[in-house]
Image (cartoon, rainbow, N blue to C red):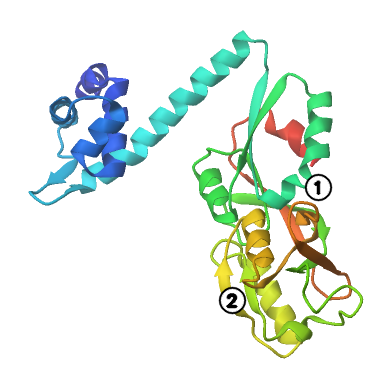
Amino acid sequence: MHQTISMINQLEIRHFEYFLVLSETLHYRKAAEKLFISQSALSQQIQRLELIVGQELFIRTNRKVSLSKFGILFKQEAELIIQQLNKSMERWKLAAEGVEGIIRIGFVGSAMQEYLPPLLKKFSQECPKIKFYLEDLSNKDQLIALEKKQLDIGFMRANDIPNSMKIKSVHKENFSLVLPKNHAINAENFENVGQLANEPFILFPNTRSQMYYQQIIKLCGDNDFTPNISHQSIHGPTIFKLVESGLGISIVPNSLKDEHNYKVQFIELDKVPYQTELFAVWNKEHQNAALPFFLDLV
């Protein structure tokens, strides 16, 4: 017990910060540049940290630097300590400004087109002393941030979540076909997706949005073909630019439609048995007292 207290008294915040940057870069020169200190100063501080904790945190060879088994364990705790410090200082700053809470919200781009703006406006009106931060992230990145408690709630098009999370369906909408403006198929002569079986498709990656991806595959399968996927992107503007350039066609959530900034046409798929669904996801063990107020509106 006495040794632990002694160790804590010797540790400084910069030790954790230096360690984390080096653990990410695994390169002393690059880490030193990020920290705006000399390489020798960084090396000295890491050696000091290892002396304080009594374990070798990095394995150093002539060719590379890697984390030791003790370093891997230490990284988990260091991340929690820095994260908690940042949150505490943030709460203090907000309290000093008269703000009673903060909610960190992650979202996929299409959620901001239709669903989220009126919800955020209503929440701001009903809870003016609770602020929110917004971050545009993929489904996968939102889940990682929720696990690390870097987000309080996420809005995603995926329902395959860990047991540590809660989920609620909040919005359903049709898909829209995206074609170049001058494509032979248009709203007047479109009958089914099978007419486009020979076209290259531009889709969201399966690894980033499995539910969406599988629905598109099933939709194509219902029309007796497997799509030839030529490009992948998680960003609507990128997809539309690729379609505009004649590099393929796409199928996107209807709310992503942008008929003014690109030379593309949209055909809403309102007669197919598939819809895209938006889910709210949050950590069961969240400790944010402001989150229940937001969940009431969701």
Q: Residue at x 69, y 28 (%)?
A: 290
Residue 67 lies left or right of residue 249; in this view the side is left
Q: Within 10 Å of the Cα at label 1, are there few (<14), some (14-19), or many (20+) other Cα atoms?
A: some
Q: Which residue is mark 2?
A: 229
Q: Residue at x 23, y 31 (%)?
A: 32
Residue 16 visible: no
Residue extending farthest left: 62
Q: Amino acid at mark 2?
A: Ile
Q: Which residue is mark 1?
A: 114
Q: Quadrant of the C terminus?
A: top right
Q: Residue at x 57, y 19 (%)?
A: 91
Q: CA distance from mark 1 to mark 2?
A: 28 Å
Pinpoint residue 47: horizontal percent, then vertical percent: 13, 30
The nearer-to-camera label among 1 and 2 is 2
Q: Name the one closer to the observer, 125 or 230.
A: 230
Residue 198 lies left or right of residue 260; in this view the side is left
228 vs 243: above or below: below
Q: Amino acid at mark 1?
A: Glu
Pick whichever of labels 1 and 2 is earlier in the sequence.
Answer: 1
216 vs 19: above or below: below
94 vs 121: above or below: above
Q: Residue at x 20, y 37 (%)?
A: 29
